[in-house]
Image (cartoon, grey):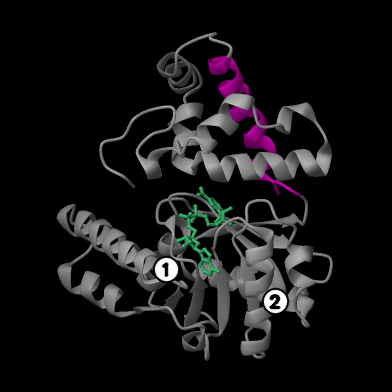
Amino acid sequence: MSTIDRVGIVGAGFMGSGIAESAASAGIDVVLYEPELNPLTRSQERLRQSLERAVSRGKLTGEDAEALIGRISYTTALDDLDGAHAVIEAAVEDQTVKREIFQDLDTRLPDALFLASNTSSIPISELASSTKRPERVLGLHFFSPVTVMKLVEIVVALDTDPGAVAIAEEFTQSIGKQSIRSTDRAGFIVNMLLVPYLMAAVRMYEAGFASAEDIDTGMRLGCGHPMGPLALCDLIGLDVLCAVCDSLYDEFKQAEYASPPMLKRMVASGRHGKKTGYGFYRYEQHA
Ligand SMILES: NC(=O)c1ccc[n+]([C@@H]2O[C@H](COP(=O)([O-])OP(=O)(O)OC[C@H]3O[C@@H](n4cnc5c(N)ncnc54)[C@H](O)[C@@H]3O)[C@@H](O)[C@H]2O)c1
């Protein structure tokens, strides 16, 4: 068991729900916060479906699934995070929203061992600077879908204390993940390598070079990738991806990071990928 046996999670969307499930499946108590009730109800439903699948495949007993469900509490009251040993923020990718959250958490949880953000693109130093204890602020960048993907990038900002990093590493290991360390630069390790590749695929499609299916089949069967780049864009979420591109472009000013016009228009039209049922492909069931 790790030093952390009660964790707060802020934001119960796609990622927050997955982080909650992973932590609870490792025996950690989770408090999942959202300002509104609807996302919490959706998160509960998502968890139920995920556990039903695991039980039907024989990966989990019904009893263990119920125990896991019992370890997650859902709340719209930030006060309920009191007593959490650490908090992971996985709210919308908006700097103003996240800064407010960190400011609030800093005041409410003076003893938390770390305050982490799952941000894909916002500098951790920005979030740390909205607190009075920047030494315990760091990035914990999970990958999607969280319950399946083993990697977590631990983002070490300018003022992050090595002790907080060590506790975060121990925590990620305790929930069955492998961590790697990155400095606080847009894109960290994986997105800095992945995003130019995904955007090249979007530009190829935009230029009418090939169909989405053929681009994806090319990379799956030609390179052994488990998923093609456009299907991966849909899975990540085109809105999230656009925000990541913007921050990479803002940081490095290199054309390879700029959002292609088509991606921006798809986001503007509400085509956010699998989670809205429509992106480069259509999906019958929303994620
Ligand atoms: N989707 C991915 O593949 C992925 C991967 C790694 C990291 N991330 C990062 O994780 C974070 C969440 O992404 P997501 O894909 O889960 O998005 P999402 O849209 O599914 O979830 C975001 C949630 O934040 C909630 N929210 C909005 N304002 C809030 C507030 N003030 N307090 C608490 N919750 C609030 C929304 O209601 C929503 O449920 C983002 O920072 C994103 O960059 C996403």
Nearer-the-camera pick, 49 or 219: 49
Residue 18 seen in render: yes
Residue 109 seen in render: no
Q: Secondary structure at mark 1?
A: helix
Separation of residues labelled 2 and 1 (CA atoms): 20 Å
- Which range is magenta? 186-206
Q: Secondary structure at mark 2?
A: helix
Q: Tell me if mark 2 has few (under 14), some (14-19) or many (20+) residues whose alpha carbon lies within 10 angstroms of its own.
A: many
Name the main secondary structure of what is drawn in magenta.
helix
Nearer-the-camera pick, 55 or 96: 96
Q: Residue drawn 30% across and 59% down?
A: 46
Residue 230 part of the magenta segment: no
Question: Which of the 4 quarters of the picture holds residue 258?
Answer: top right
Q: Residue drawn 43% across and 50% down?
A: 145
Nearer-the-camera pick, 70 or 77: 77
Image spot of residue 195 (x, y percent):
64, 35
Label located before the other in sequence (2 or 1) = 1
Q: Residue drawn 84% across and 65% down?
A: 158
Q: Residue drawn 65% across and 44% down?
A: 244
The residue that label 1 is drawn on is 20
Check the image and report above or below for 189 versus 116. above
Nearer-the-camera pick, 18 or 234: 234
- Tell me the amino acid under the disc marked 1: Ala
- Tell me the amino acid under the disc marked 2: Ala
The residue that label 2 is drawn on is 164
Q: Tell me if mark 1 has few (under 14), some (14-19) or many (20+) residues whose alpha carbon lies within 10 angstroms of its own.
A: many
Q: Is residue 8 left or right of residue 123?
A: left
Image spot of residue 144 (x, y percent):
47, 49
Image spot of residue 268 (x, y percent):
53, 37
Is mark 2 in CB contact (under 8 Å) with mark 1? no
Q: Is residue 262 left or right of residue 59?
A: right
